[in-house]
Amino acid sequence: MTGQPVTTGYVYYANSHQRQPVEISAELKAEAIATIQAVSSLLSTGIMPAPVYSKRCSGCSLYSQCLPQAADKVGRYQEVDDL
């Protein structure tokens, strides 16, 4: 809009009320474009990837909808016949 290059951005974490600086590089821009294309593909096909649990999940606003630990348990569940 102003014609000035933007070299730094910030990611705001609402849960902890913290802001982290992010250096905007050509590599980051390429990764962002690839991510946008991947999400667009997911939305157009309707096929969503399986959730993967990590320590970042506890701060995620979508944790209750995603349930990454529950999905992992369901995937490992096996019925045992005692007959």
Image (tube, grey):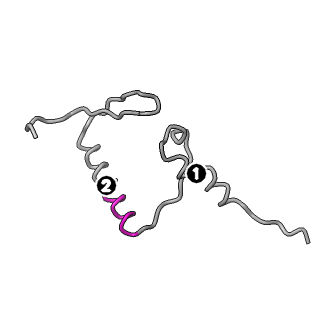
Residue type marked 1 = Leu
Question: What residue lies at 53% left-to-right and 46% top-to-bottom?
Answer: 63
The Cα atoms of the two marked residues, 1 and 2, are separated by 23 Å
Helix, strand or loop at disc 1? loop
Position of 56 compared to 18: left or right? right
Which span is picked out in magenta?
A: 36-45
Instruction: Report the magenta stretch's main SS.
Output: helix
Question: Measured from the top left, where is residue 71 in percent x and y?
Answer: 61, 56
Q: Residue furthest left?
A: 3
**Can residue 37 be found in the magenta stretch?**
yes
Q: Where is residue 44 in the image (x, y as percent from the top left)?
A: 36, 68
Count of numbered labels shown in the rendering: 2
Q: Label 2: few (<14), some or many (≥20) within 10 Å? A: few
Q: In this view, does 38 lie to the left or right of 24?
A: right
Determine whether 41 is above or below 3 in the image.
below
25 on left or right of 46: left
**Residue under label 1:** 67
What amino acid is found at the position of numbered circle 2 in the picture? Ile
- As drawn, which residue projects farthest toward the right? 83
Q: Are the residues at dot 1 and dot 2 in contact (C-beta closer than 8 Å)?
A: no
Q: Name the quadrant containing residue 21.
A: top left
* Residue linked to disc 2: 36
